[in-house]
Image (spheres, rainbow, N blue to C red):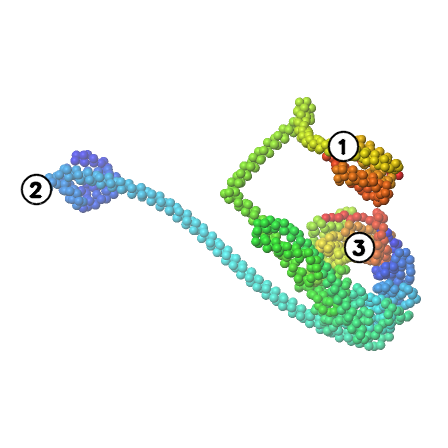
C-alpha cells in the first residue's frame, strides 16, 4: 500500500472522472485536474468564487463547478481549456446543480425550489421544470441515463414526473400516495422506481416505469419510519433502513420482505466476526457505543452484501446467506465508508488518521503517513478499485492498494473478536 | 331360717332402714324389692331378705310371700286346704321349687345385667370416642370457618382491587382514547395547518416566481464560448407528437425487455426445478420398482396396478419433449406422478412399519413363540460355540505367544507338524489331481501312438507306392528339376522317420520359407500343413501331395504371389491348431512344439533382413 504526497484541498471537493483517468480537486476558487497515474497537473481552471460543488460529466469531458453563494455555475472542458461556460441563475438563486446523464445539460435548482432550469450546452434552449419538491432526494436518473424521475409538490400533494432525458419530454406524471414524499430512487435496471414517505411514516411505494403502482410496503405504523433506501446492483433486492434500527430486505418479485436484519446489542453467533478497534491499552469505551439512531444508509454491493452502521460500528451482512457477516466496531464514529467498486472490500474512515479496510478475509487499519495528523473525513474509490482518494479538511492524498505485499509497519491487523 | 337371721349384716344402716319399713304395705315392699333387684349386689338382697323375716312375723311373711308369688304366677306356697277353715299348711316342696325358680331367674337376671353392663361400657367408650371426634370436628369447623372468612376477606380485597384496576384500565383506555383523539385532532390540525402553510408558501413561491422570473432578469443567462455537439453526435430534434409516441414506444420496449428478461429467468428457474423434480421422480421410481417386483410375484392386485402406473410414468419419462409442453400440463403430469410416487413410497414405508410392528406382534403368537424359543436355543447354542471357539483361539494365541517368546522346540515342532500336515493334505490333493491328469494324458498318448503307428504303416505303403511310381517316372523322364529332386530327397527323408514329432518339425520348417524363397514346393508344403490338421487322413495328404507335385512347375509361381500373405495367416492358424493337437498328447509333444516355435522364430529373425 502506497500513499501519494499530500495535496491541498478545500470543502472535501475531490472526484475521480467517470472514465477513471483524471482526478479533479478544488482549492478555494481553483479547480485542479490531475492525471490519476502520474498525479501531474493537467489543467488548472480558475473560477469566479469559492467552489462549493463539482461534478464530472458522464463522458468525463466537462466539469461543473457550482458556486451556490453567487448563484453561478461554471463549466470547463478538458479537451479545450480555453472553452468556458458560465451560467448565472441571477436573483432566483441556486441550491443544487447537476449534470444530466448525457453530459450536455445542466440541471439547476433555484432557491426555494421554485423551479429547475435545464440548460443545454448544445443549443441555446433553456427548459424549466416547475414545482420540484424540496426533499432529500428529489431527482434520480436511471442508470442508462434515459429517464429522469422528479419528485414534485403541487397543491399539497406529491407527484412524480418521469422525463425522457434526450429531449426533456414529460413521459409520465402521477400522484403518489404519500404524506410527504422524501426520496425517490430508480432500480439499477431502470424499470422500478422506489418512492418513500417522510420519516414520520413507514411507507415505501414501488412504481413501474409507466407509472403503475406495483406495490406498497409498510413495516409498522405510528413510529418513525424509513431512514434510507438502497437498491442492490442486480435490482433484486431493496434494502430499507428504518428508525427502529432494522434493515428490511424486499424482493423484486412480490415486493414482500424477505428478511429483517436487526442490530442486536450482543452478538452471540460464533460465526460472526466482530472486529473491535483496540488501542494498546485495552480500555475500550464500550459504554459509549450508544444505540442512537443508526446513521447512514444500507447499500447492498457487488458482492451481495449489505452494510449499515451505527455511529461507531459498521455492520456487514451477507445477502447470499441472508445473515450478519461481520461487525466492525470503531473507537470513533464512522465518518464515511464506501465499497470497492470491483470486489467485496470496504473502506472506512472515522475522522482519524487511519484508514480501515475490511474484506471477508479480514480487517486492517493503515496509518496515513505524512507530517501532522491527516484526519480522513471522507474517501472515494477509483473505478478500478486499486486506489482511492482520502480527503481531510484541507488536504487529500491518494492511496494505492495494488501492492498489497508492501504493507509496511504502518499497517496493523486488528484483532478479531468472536 | 336360722341362716337368714345370722346373715344379718353389720352394715345395717340400710337394713335398719328396710327393717323400719317392714311394716310397710307389701306393695311398697315390692317396690323396694324391685329397686333392690336393680342393685347389682346380691349381698344386699340377702341382707334385705334377712331383714325381711323375723321370728315374729314368719307367718305374715310367708303369707306375704305366698301372695306375692301367686301374683307373679308361682304356685301357692301353701298346701291345698281340704277344709276351708283349716289353717293352710306350708308346702315345703312348693317353697323349694319356688326358691329354685327364683334362683334361676336371679341367675338369668345377673347374666342379663352383665351383658347390659358390658354394653353400657362399650357404649360409654363409643360415646367418648364420638365426643372426641365431635370436638375435633368442631375445631376443624372452626378453623375452616376462620379460613373461609380469611379467604372471603381476600376475595373481597381482590375484587376491590380488580374493580379498582378495571376502573384504572377504563380510565387509561379513556385516556388513550382521549390522547388518540387528541393526536388525531392534532394530526388533522397539523395537516391542516401544514396545508395552509404550504398553500401560503406556494402562494409566496408563486409570487416570488412571478417577481423573479417574469421580471426580465438579465442576469439569468448562460455565457458560453460556443455550443458543443451532442454526446451522441446527433442534432436535437423538435418535439412533436411523433417523438412523444417514440418515447412511449421506447419506454414500453424497455419495460417489455425487463419483463422478458425476468420471464426468461423464471423459465430457467422453472426448468431447473422441473429437472430436480424429474430427477426425484426417477430416483423414486428406481427406488420403488425393485421393491415392487416382489409383491407382484405374490399377485397382489393393488401393487399390480401401482406397477403399471410406475411403468407408465417411466414411459412418459423417456419423452424428452416434455419440456416443450405447456407449463400446466407438465406441472400436472409431474406433480401428479410425483404425488403418486410419494404415495407409493409412503404406503411402502407404512407397510414396512406394519411389518416391523407385525414382527413384534408375532412374537406373541403361539407358533412364533415356539420358533422363537427354537431361535433362542439356537442362538444360545451358537453363542456357546462362539465362546468355545473364542477360548480355543485364546489358547492358540497363548500357545503362539509362548512360541514366540520362548522358542520351545516341542511346540515349534508340533506347530510345524501342524503346518506340514496341512501342506501334506494339500499336496495329496494336488497329487491325486495330477495322477488323474496323468492318466488322461497316458490314455491320449496311447491313442496317438496308435494313430502314429497306423500312419507309419500307411506311409510305408505309400512310400512303396511312390517308390514304384517314382521309378516309373524316373524311367519316363530323364531330366528332372534339381530343386524338385531335392525336395523329393527331403520327402524321402520323411519316409524314413515315421516319428510324429519329426513330421511336425519338417512340415513346419518349409512353412517359413515362403518369406525368402518364392518357390512352389514350400508353398505346397505350407498348404499341406494347412490341410493336414483339417483332414488328418494320410491318404488325402498323399493325394494332395501327388497333385501338387504334378502341377508344381506350373502352378508354383502363380500361387506364391497370392498366397504369401494368407500363408502367414495360415501359418498362425496351423500353429494354433498344432498346439491344440499337441496338448492332448504327452508332455514331450508339448516340449517339441515349444522348441519348434522357438526355432521358427529364430528362422524368422534370420529372414527378416
Q: Nearer the viewer, residue B605 or B336?
A: B605
Q: SS of the residue at dot 1?
A: helix
Which residue, given by chain and number where applicable, does mark 3 sit on?
A343
Q: Earlier in the sequence, mark 1 or mark 2?
A: 2
Residue B377 placement, left or right of A417 = left
Image: B457 above or below B230: above
Q: Quarter holding the N terminus of chain B? A: top left
Q: Position of residue B213 (x, y in %)?
A: 82, 75
Foreground mark, 1 or 3, reads 1
Q: Quarter holding the C terminus of chain B? A: top right
Could you tell me how far apart the alpha carbons at marks 1 and 2 are, in whole angstroms?
A: 182 Å
Q: At 54% across and 37% down in the image, what residue appears?
A: B377
Which residue, given by chain and number where applicable, does mark 2 sit on?
B82
Residues at badges 1 and 3 in contact (C-beta under 8 Å)? no
Q: Quadrant of residue A172?
A: bottom right
Q: Position of residue B45 (x, y in %)?
A: 22, 39
Q: Position of residue B138 (x, y in %)?
A: 41, 50
Amino acid at each position: 500500500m502506497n500513499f501519494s504526497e499530500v495535496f491541498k484541498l478545500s470543502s472535501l471537493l475531490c472526484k475521480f472522472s467517470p472514465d477513471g483517468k483524471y482526478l479533479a480537486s478544488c482549492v478555494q476558487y481553483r479547480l485542479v485536474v490531475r492525471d490519476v497515474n502520474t498525479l501531474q497537473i493537467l489543467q488548472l481552471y480558475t473560477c469566479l468564487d469559492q467552489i462549493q460543488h463539482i461534478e464530472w460529466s458522464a463522458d468525463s469531458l466537462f466539469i461543473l463547478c457550482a458556486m451556490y453563494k453567487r448563484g453561478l455555475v461554471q463549466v470547463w472542458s478538458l479537451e479545450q481549456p480555453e472553452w468556458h461556460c458560465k451560467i448565472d441563475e441571477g436573483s432566483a438563486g441556486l441550491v443544487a446543480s447537476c449534470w444530466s446523464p448525457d453530459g450536455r445539460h445542466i440541471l439547476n435548482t433555484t432557491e426555494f425550489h421554485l423551479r429547475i432550469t435545464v440548460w443545454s450546452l448544445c443549443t441555446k434552449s433553456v427548459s424549466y421544470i416547475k414545482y420540484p419538491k424540496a426533499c432529500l432526494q428529489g431527482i434520480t436518473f436511471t442508470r442508462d441515463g434515459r429517464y429522469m424521475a422528479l419528485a414534485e409538490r403541487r397543491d399539497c400533494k406529491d407527484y412524480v414526473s418521469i422525463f425522457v432525458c434526450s429531449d426533456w419530454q414529460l413521459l409520465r406524471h402521477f400522484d403518489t400516495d404519500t404524506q410527504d414524499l422524501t426520496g425517490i430512487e430508480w432500480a439499477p435496471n431502470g424499470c422500478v422506481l422506489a418512492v418513500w414517505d417522510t420519516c414520520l411514516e413507514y411507507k415505501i411505494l414501488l412504481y413501474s416505469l409507466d407509472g403503475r403502482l406495483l406495490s406498497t410496503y409498510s413495516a409498522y405504523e405510528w413510529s418513525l419510519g424509513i431512514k434510507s433506501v438502497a437498491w442492490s446492483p442486480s435490482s433484486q433486492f431493496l434494502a430499507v433502513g428504518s428508525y427502529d434500527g432494522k434493515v428490511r430486505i424486499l424482493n423484486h418479485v412480490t415486493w414482500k420482505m424477505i428478511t429483517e436484519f436487526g442490530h442486536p446489542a450482543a452478538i452471540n453467533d460464533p460465526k460472526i466476526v466482530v472486529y473491535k478497534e483496540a488501542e494498546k491499552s485495552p480500555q475500550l469505551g464500550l459504554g459509549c457505543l450508544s444505540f442512537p439512531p443508526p446513521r447512514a444508509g444500507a447499500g447492498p454491493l457487488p458482492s451481495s452484501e449489505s452494510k449499515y452502521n451505527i455511529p461507531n460500528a459498521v455492520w456487514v451482512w451477507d445477502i447470499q446467506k441472508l445473515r450478519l457477516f461481520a461487525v466492525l466496531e470503531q473507537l470513533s464514529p464512522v465518518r464515511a465508508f464506501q465499497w470497492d467498486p470491483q470486489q467485496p472490500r470496504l473502506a472506512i474512515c472515522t475522522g482519524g488518521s487511519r484508514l480501515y479496510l475490511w474484506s471477508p478475509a479480514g480487517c486492517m487499519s493503515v496509518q496515513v503517513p505524512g507530517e501532522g495528523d491527516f484526519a480522513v473525513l471522507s474517501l472515494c474509490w477509483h473505478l478500478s478499485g486499486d486506489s482511492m482518494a482520502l480527503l481531510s479538511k484541507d488536504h487529500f492524498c491518494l492511496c494505492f492498494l495494488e501492492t498489497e505485499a508492501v504493507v509496511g509497519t504502518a499497517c496493523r491487523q486488528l484483532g478479531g473478536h468472536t | 331360717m336360722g341362716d337368714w337371721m345370722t346373715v344379718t349384716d353389720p352394715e345395717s344402716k340400710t337394713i335398719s332402714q328396710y327393717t323400719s319399713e317392714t311394716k310397710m304395705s307389701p306393695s311398697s315392699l315390692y317396690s323396694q324389692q324391685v329397686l333392690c333387684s336393680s342393685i347389682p349386689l346380691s349381698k344386699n338382697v340377702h341382707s334385705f331378705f334377712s331383714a325381711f323375716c323375723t321370728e315374729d312375723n314368719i307367718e305374715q311373711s310367708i303369707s306375704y310371700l305366698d301372695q306375692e308369688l301367686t301374683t307373679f304366677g308361682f304356685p301357692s306356697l301353701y298346701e291345698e286346704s281340704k277344709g276351708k277353715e283349716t289353717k293352710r299348711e306350708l308346702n315345703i316342696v312348693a317353697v323349694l321349687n319356688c326358691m329354685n325358680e327364683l334362683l334361676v331367674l336371679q341367675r338369668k337376671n345377673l347374666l342379663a345385667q352383665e351383658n347390659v353392663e358390658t354394653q353400657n361400657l362399650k357404649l360409654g367408650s363409643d360415646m367418648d370416642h364420638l365426643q372426641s371426634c365431635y370436638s375435633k370436628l368442631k375445631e376443624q369447623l372452626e378453623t375452616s370457618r376462620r379460613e373461609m372468612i380469611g379467604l372471603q376477606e381476600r376475595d373481597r380485597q381482590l375484587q376491590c382491587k380488580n374493580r379498582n384496576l378495571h376502573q384504572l384500565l377504563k380510565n387509561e383506555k379513556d385516556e388513550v382514547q382521549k390522547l388518540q383523539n387528541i393526536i388525531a385532532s392534532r394530526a388533522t390540525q397539523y395537516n391542516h395547518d401544514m396545508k395552509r402553510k404550504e398553500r401560503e408558501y406556494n402562494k409566496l413561491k408563486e409570487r416570488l416566481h412571478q417577481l423573479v422570473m417574469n421580471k426580465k432578469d438579465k442576469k439569468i443567462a448562460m455565457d458560453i464560448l460556443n455550443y458543443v455537439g451532442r454526446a451522441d453526435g446527433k442534432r436535437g430534434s423538435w418535439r412533436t407528437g411523433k417523438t412523444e409516441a417514440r418515447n412511449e414506444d421506447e419506454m414500453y420496449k424497455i419495460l417489455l425487455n425487463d419483463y422478458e428478461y425476468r420471464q426468461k429467468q423464471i423459465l430457467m428457474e422453472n426448468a431447473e426445478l422441473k429437472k430436480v423434480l424429474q430427477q426425484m421422480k426417477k430416483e423414486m421410481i428406481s427406488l420403488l420398482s425393485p421393491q415392487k417386483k416382489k409383491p407382484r410375484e405374490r399377485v397382489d392386485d393393488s401393487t399390480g396396478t401401482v406397477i403399471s402406473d410406475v411403468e407408465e410414468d417411466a414411459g412418459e419419462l423417456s419423452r424428452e419433449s416434455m419440456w416443450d409442453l405447456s407449463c400446466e400440463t407438465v406441472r400436472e403430469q409431474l406433480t401428479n406422478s410425483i404425488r403418486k410416487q410419494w404415495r407409493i413410497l409412503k404406503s411402502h414405508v407404512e407397510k414396512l412399519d406394519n411389518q416391523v410392528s407385525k414382527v413384534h406382534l408375532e412374537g406373541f403368537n403361539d407358533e412364533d413363540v415356539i420358533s422363537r424359543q427354537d431361535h433362542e436355543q439356537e442362538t444360545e447354542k451358537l453363542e456357546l460355540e462362539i465362546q468355545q471357539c473364542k477360548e480355543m483361539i485364546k489358547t492358540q494365541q497363548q500357545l503362539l505367544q509362548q512360541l514366540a517368546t520362548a522358542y520351545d522346540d516341542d511346540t515349534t515342532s508340533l506347530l510345524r507338524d501342524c503346518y506340514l500336515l496341512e501342506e501334506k493334505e494339500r499336496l495329496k490333493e494336488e497329487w491325486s489331481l495330477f495322477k488323474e491328469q496323468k492318466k488322461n494324458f497316458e490314455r491320449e498318448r496311447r491313442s496317438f501312438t496308435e494313430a502314429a503307428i497306423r500312419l507309419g504303416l500307411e506311409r510305408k505303403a505309400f512310400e512303396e507306392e511312390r517308390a514304384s511310381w517314382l521309378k516309373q517316372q524316373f524311367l519316363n523322364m530323364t531330366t528332372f528339376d534339381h530343386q524338385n529332386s531335392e525336395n523329393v530327397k527331403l520327402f524321402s527323408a520323411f519316409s524314413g522317420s515315421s516319428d510324429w514329432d519329426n513330421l511336425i518339425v519338417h512340415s513346419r520348417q518349409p512353412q517359413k520359407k515362403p518369406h525368402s524363397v518364392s518357390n512352389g514346393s514350400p508353398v505346397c508344403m505350407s498348404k499341406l500343413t494347412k490341410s493336414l490338421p483339417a483332414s488328418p487322413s494320410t491318404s488325402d495328404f498323399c493325394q494332395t501331395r501327388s497333385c501338387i507335385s504334378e502341377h508344381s512347375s506350373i502352378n508354383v509361381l502363380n500361387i506364391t504371389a497370392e498366397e504369401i500373405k494368407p500363408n502367414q495367416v495360415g501359418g498362425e492358424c496351423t500353429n494354433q491348431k498344432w498346439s491344440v493337437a499337441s496338448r492332448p498328447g504327452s508332455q514331450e509333444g508339448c516340449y517339441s512344439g515349444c522348441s519348434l516355435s522357438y526355432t521358427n522364430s529364430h528362422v524368422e529373425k534370420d529372414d527378416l533382413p
